[in-house]
Structure formats: structure tokens, C-alpha cells
Amino acid sequence: MPVDFLSDEQVARYRRFRDEVSVAELEQFFRLDAKTLNVLASKRRPATKLGWAVQWGTVRMLGTFLADDPLEIPAEVMEFVAGQLDIDPACAPEYLTRPKTAYEHSWEIRDLLKLSEFSNREKEVREYLAARVWSTTEGPRALFDRAVVHMLSEGILLPAGVTTLTRLISEIRREENARLHRTLAERTGPELRSMLAGLLLVPEGRRVSELERLRTPPIRASGRVMTAELRRVAEIGALQAGAVPVEPVPMVKMTALARYGLASKAPTLRDLEDDRKAATLLATVRHLETSSVDDALDVLDLLITSNLLARAERAGKAEQLRTFPKLRSAARTMASAMEVLMSAPEATADRLVSLVEVWKAIEEVVPRERLAAAVETVAAFVPVTDDDAAAEWRAELVKRYRTVQGFIELLLEVIRFRAVAAGGPVLAMVRTAAAMAKSRRRHGPGDIAAHEPLITGSWRPLVYRNPDLPEGQIDKAAFMLCAVMHLHQALRRRDVFAEGADRWSDPRARLLEGAAWEAARPKILTSLELETEPAAHLAELASALEGAYTRVLNGLGANTAVQFTGGKLHVEKLGALEEPPLMKEFRALIDAMLPRLDFPELLLEVFDRTGLPADFTHISGADSPMEDFATSLCGLIVAEACNVGLVPIEKPNVPALTRARLLQVDQGYLRAETISAANARLISAQAGLDIVKTWGGGQIASADGLRFVVPVQNLHTGHSPLYFGRQRGATWLNVVNDQVMGIGGLVVPGTLRDSLFILDAIHNLDGGDRPETVITDTASYSDIVFGLFAICGYQFSPRIADLGDTRLWRTNTRALYGPLDAMSRHTIRLDRIRAHWGDMLRVAGSLTMGTVRAYDLIRMLSADGRTTGLGDAFAHYGRIFKTLHLLQFISDSGYRRMIGTQLNVQEGRHRLARKICFGNRGQLRQRYREGMENQLGTLGLALNAVVWWNTLYLDAAVKQLREQGFPATKDMCARLSPIRYDHINFLGRYAFTRADLTAGLRPFHDLTGEKD
């Protein structure tokens, strides 16, 4: 029976010892307990005791007895067991003089440990694997490892042949997947199955199937695209796939089926077995019901912000500039008249000043006709009402109402909007506007009286006093635009949300509540070290805040870096630390020693040393059966990370690098989940290297954005003249730990504030330890962000560029803080925190469990400068930690240096990212969100591969130099960085050659000048 789906490592370690056994494994499996020692006391000969103890530990570790030679074990195992028994390991061969002894001992150990033969408990193993297959998307390799671990923990001896287990896994996967497909197909019904199958056909006159058309998201925003997207939503919803009950099927399986259906070509799906085809299409269409609503609202958001608001603002400014000369001339004329009026003598009891005299004096300076024209010009350009600053662009916006008129009615028909109390009036206003859109009759103020509170500022004259309309008639276009602007704002702060959406859904509905919250609360509160009653916690924080003020004030005299100028606080920048002796020479030696190689060679070596290709399972859930899959994967990673495309990579004469093979790997294997799994493997592998411990413990992480211009149409990009010029772009927010590994990241449209997304990135790490401190660069950050980070157990530590206008907060209103008094006048309201503490804990639990996104919550808690009651509570809670951070930043130079050092690490990785991603001038040319996420995820994986390889060779180089007598201290090693690339060739024609791992590491450069 073939074992193709197993890796060579899995086959090699099945029922066998590895070359080396770790200390942890020795302690776990071969440490003799009291019960075992009592049994051994009955054994007479030392060799018998030693052999029995070795077999006892072997079966606990391997799940089997070594029938051929029970003493065929690593030397460290024999020495560890013999040491506990105070026996000379040299006597071990005597144990084999009577072969039946080892056999008898194995049965004795079976009884002692209550071990069972696989054949007797195969049903139990089958049920365990069936449950895993049904409820997870684990591939056969992962299931094999799960099965082995399960049998070890349950006391089931492994079957003698590896094929027994692989055959069982293959059989169960077939059976459970068939049950899954059959369950969904039966629930689909013949009519829906027929409609779903019809999606795979190509209509006459078109080039793609209906499924391809429906699953293709938009790439631009306009009124026409908005209408088309709403019709796509309606068309998908008309299939009624969402009405099919699928509750017995785990959501993770539905997601996996949908992922396969979204990525596979129509002919591939047509060739599937009928039940699998129906199940896959059902899951795909159900996914499209959600994603299409999100896509439509993404178009609406971009349409309003970029196409309507931005253009209206530009037109408003242009109109201001156009009218400015006329307005300035008219104002100068009126000013001349006012000067004459102001200089006229005041009337007294003896002399009266007549109006005729005043006008005569004015007309000598400004003719009356000219003054009248000036007054008329000012009246035309300056509204008589006290309008807001948005008057000009809103007036321009009204001229574009036909863009909205074309889809507003369809928007409400297709998307099921719901609202909280604050959004109810907005939704009612939009419904009135939609009804007006199809009405040709004239409307008066009475028709919109219910919505008058929302028509404020410069909207009022636009709606009620259009000079081109008869008296008493409202401007329908202005009212419609006013309603849409309110809808846009309410959607962004989630006061209005869409049923069936994901990104535009109600975050409140995702918060844990009821039985789910009651079940999760004890564990969450324990992990976050919080209590249901906040009194003790808040008292402790108040005490910590008072202590921080005291420490700062006590240290001001000795803290020469702190200065007060004009009542404002300034902190001097830190200078560079003095380097240890010989550091320059040490760094030069290391740089000279590192082997020179091409980027593909580095990737292939990383693959071979870590087994990383095993993490890239097929989109269907199977492992890759491809020959030389690692080379194909390496070629694709080079093409994506270097941003050069497939042309420089493909080689028609190399089967693993043909265009067809590379496209097959791209479509089936390279996606967010597999990239994340591969990153987790690299993070874990790098943390085990000795030199890494000098860089950090993994508890500190930084998050920062790397900007990319996206010159092609893409809905998930944004404008920023600072970063993208006149083009659009996206931000790759990545999280890096103090061991220099990227542990997570996500793509942010445009340049939205990084702080809105950092908590989401931290809660969705690829691997590594959970960081305790999260550092960011200087940017706008809110009190609410501080509060959310704190309640989730993180210390948020942004770098502060200027402390001069910083506001500190206090809980003690009577305390005197000397020079800091002026900065700390504002009081933290602990009562507001207490009032909302229960909901704050529920938010923290929901964020920790991943049921809600922090980005949505932040937008909900605070939008347009307004905060909800819960948002205000989080803001006051965050002010405690923000003030503690600022006070430590002021007083502790080590804290400031730690922040700066970690941000330098982040900047170094960004430089390396730019070095790797050099193709197409470093611009992304992906038209869809998934494309950007996959390419930037691949870039992150390439960065981690380079850092892992550099770390491996830095560690070896340091050890070699120490062996040669160089005094490489820990302090010196701590100053080495794995972010180096001069020895790596990223350019040119790529050669995919593999290193000989049997020879160890690549040879270092010979510093004596001799040949390698």
C-alpha cells in the first residue's frame, strides 16, 4: 500500500527513535516513577532491570515495542535510564541473551500500563479520525500525526506497518467526505441542484460561465458599477441557497467547500461527482450571498468617498477660487464705503448729520451703482445663514445626485438594512429618499418633516431654499444626497448595518452574550487576570498612576533629558549606545564569513531543512502528490515575492517550472491559510536557535505599515498624496517580534489609521508567543485604542514624537504634580468605567475569542468625533494606561530605547522587503483584495525565510569564531541582526539548485584567504 501522502520525515519516525532525543522527551517518557521502581525492585539482574526500564520508556514514547532489538535506542536514552538505576550501561547486551525475556517483559509492561493492541481498538481510532475529518479541514498528513498522538495518549499500540494507518486514514476521509457531500446534496433539492449546475454553463454570446461572472468582484466604483453589483446581489440571493438548512455541517467545512468552488474552474467543477458538485456549489453560492453584499457596500463606500465627496470638494474649492476675484473686488468696494461711513463726524446736540450728507461723501469715493453691485455680489456668494464649512462642496455634491438616483431604490430593495436606535432615523430618511427617487411629483417641507432634525447646517438652504424652485418646494436632489451622506456615516460607525454581510454587519451581534458568554467568561477572566467586580482592579490602577507621577517628579532633578520650555515638556532624543570592544571587527568577520547564494537556493535550503512544503496542502484539503513540488513552490514564491511574474521563473524544459505547473501550484496551494502555517513553522524553528535568545524572548512586538502603490483598478485601495502621489495604494500592516520574525499581518485599504487594525493583526498571529508589549511608530492614536489594548492584556507603547502638547490624566483631583500640573488637569472618570465594566469584559472576551473585529468595534465606539457610553468608558480606561505609558516614556530612558530599538527592527525588515520586492518598481498590480493578501503574505513568508536562514548561519558563524578563540560575548551577539542581504542575489536569471544537506551547512568563506 503506497504512503504517498506522508512526508519522508513521518515515515522515518514512525515507530522509530530520532537520532537525538531531547531532554524534555527523556524527562517525559523515561523518568522512572515510584510505581515503576517498585516493579523493578523485583528484578534481580542489572541487565534485566535496565532492559525492562528501556522497554517501558520506549513504548510510552513510540507507542510500540522494538521487537527486533529492544536496545536499539539512542545512547543518551540508555545513559539516562541507567543513571536512574545506578547501573553500568555496558551490561545492556546481557539482556538479549534470552530473547524470550524481552517478549515476556513487553506483556508485563502492557498490563502495567494498560496498553491495547490496535486491532482491539481500531473502532475507537476510526471514530476519532472520523470526527476529525468531519469537523476540521486537516489533510491526511496532519490526520496521521493526530492519530499517532491520540493512540499514544489513549494507550493503543501502533500497528506494525505504517500502511495500516495510512489505509485507514484514506478510507475514513473518503467515507466522511462522501457523507458530507451526500448530506448537503440531499438538503439542496432537485430544483436548486439544477439551478446550481446551470451556473457552470457558458451562456450563448458570453465567454465565461455564470459562476465565473457571479464570483468576480468589482474593481472600481461608479454609479453604473453600483447598479451592476446590486443586481449581482439580487441574482445570487434569488437562488435561495441561504435558505437551505446546513446546521449539521460544521462551518469550517462549508468554508473549505466554498474556497474550492471559488478557486476552481467551471470545467473542473462540472467533472465532479454529482453529490460533491452540488455540495460545493451550494457552499460557494452561500458564501457569495455574504461576499456580494460586502462588495456592493464597498463600492458604495468608495463611490461616496472618492467619486462623490472628493470630486465635490475639488469642485467646491475650484468654485471658491473662481469666485474669489469677484468677491474680493466687491469686498474692497464695500470696505471703501464703510471707511467713509466710519469717518463721518458723530451727531451732537448742536449739529445733526443727515443721511444725504453721508451718501454724498460715500458717492465721492464709490458710485452708488457700483456699491449696489458689490452688495449684490457678496450676497450671492456669502449665504445669509450661519452655515458650516461644508457649504461649497455640498452644493457641488447636489449636482451629482443622478449618480445616486440611479441605484438608491435598488439599494434598499436588494440589501436588508437594519439599524440600532441611533441609526433608525437615518434609515427612515433613506427610505423616504428612495421613494422620492421614483416619484415625479413635487414635494414640500411637510413630506420630509419627520427628517428635519437630520437636515442641518448647509444642507438646510440646499434642501429648503433652492432659488430655482417655486416657494414651498423642497429640492429633492439635495434631500436625497443628504440622506445618502447620513447613510454612509451611519454605515461606517455601524449604526446602520446590512443583514447577511460580513465586513458591514453589526459588530454588536458578534459579541459573546447569554449562555455563550457565561460559559466562556471564567476562562477569559482568568487568562486576562480580571474580575467581574472592578473595584480592586481600578484601585490598583489608581495607585499605580499615583506612583508613576511620584517617580517622575522625584527623578526630574536627575533626569537631564527632560526640559520645560515655556511651560511645555520636551524630552531629548537618545543618542547611540557605545558599542562593546571588538564589535566592529566582530561584525566584519561575520559579514565576510556568510556564504553567497541566489535567493531560490536560499528558499530551497529553507524548505529542505524545515520541511516547509508540507504546510502547503491543496485547496481541496489533500496533500500534494506532485513530484519535485518544492521546486515549483519555490519558483512561485520567487515570482510573487520579487514581484517579477512568471516569465523569469518558468523553464519549459524543467517539469517543475513550466508555466502550467506554476499556475497549478498558484491556484491550488498558495493561499492565506497555507502561508500562515508555513510562517508558523519558520517562527518556531527560528526560536530554537541559540543566538535568538540574545535578541529577545518574543514578548515584544511592533506593528507598522509598509505602503505600496497599486496603479491598477482595485476597490480596496485608497488615495494618499504623501505616499502614492496621484495614484492609489494599499498598506501592508505587519507585526514583527523582537526575535526579528514576522508573526502576523494584514492588508489595509489605502492609508487608514494603522491603530484601527493593529489589535486585529495581534489577535490573528501566524505563530510565536503572544506578545505582551505592542509598539507602534508615531501616529494618531486614540484613548479608546489604549483601552481596548489594555483590557485585552497588551501594553500599547507608541513612540511619541512631541510631548509638548501631550495631555496627562489623573484620578486624584487634589494632588499637586508640580511642573506636570498644567499637563494633567483632566480627570479620569472611574465611575463611567464601573458603570460599563460588564460590557467592557464582554468586548474583551469577544476580541480574545475572535468573534468580533477590533476595527469594527473602534469605528462603532467612536465615529465622527462622537463616542457612545461604552466608548467613553473605554476612553477613560485607556487614559489610565496612556498616562502610565507617557510617564514611563518621560522618566525611563531604557523604555524609550526599547521602543526605538524595536521600531528599528521593523524598519530594517521593511528595507529588506523593498529589496526583495523590486519588480514592477515595487508596485502591486493585483486587482482584487485576495490577490494583494496572497502576494504580500508570500512576501512576508520570503522575509521570514531570509531571516531564518541568516539566523541559522549567524548562529553557526558565532560558534565557529568562539571555537577559534574570538571573544564573542552575548552583548556582541545581541547587536547582530539577521536582517542582512548583501550576500543574497535577488536579481538576474534564477537557478533552482539544492544544497547537499548530508554535508551539513554550506561552508563559510575562508577568512585566511585559502580556498574553500
Image: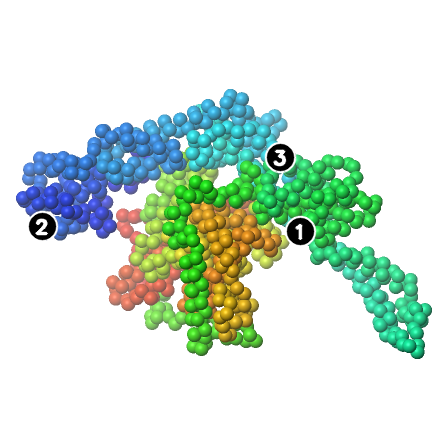
Residue 310, which numbered label? 1
Give the foreground label among 1 and 3. Answer: 3
Disc 1 residue type (three-letter): Ala
Using the numbered discs, state the Cα–Cα distance from disc 2 to disc 1 in whole angstroms: 84 Å
| Disc number placed over residue 414 in the picture, else none | 3
Neighbour tally class for label 2: few under 14, some 14-19, many 20 plus, Cα within 10 Å:
some
In the foreground, 788 or 380: 788
**What amino acid is found at the position of numbered circle 2 in the picture?**
Ile
Q: Residue at x 79, y 48 (%)?
A: 466
The residue at which mark 2 appears reads as 87
Q: Residue 649: where, in percent of width, then height?
A: 45, 44
Give the mark count.
3
Give percent across and percent down for residue 309.
Answer: 67, 50
Disc 3 on helix, strand or loop?
helix
- Tell me if mark 3 has few (under 14), some (14-19) or many (20+) residues whose alpha carbon lies within 10 angstroms of its own: some
From the viewer's perspective, tell me whether residue 826 is left or right of residue 385: left
Q: Is residue 56 above or below residue 240?
A: below
Q: Quadrant of residue 125?
A: top left
Residue 786 locus on image (x, y percent): 49, 57
Q: CA distance from mark 2 to mark 3?
A: 81 Å
Residue 369 in sight here: yes
Q: Report the quarter where the C terminus lies.
A: bottom left
Residue 513 on image: x %, y % = 47, 43
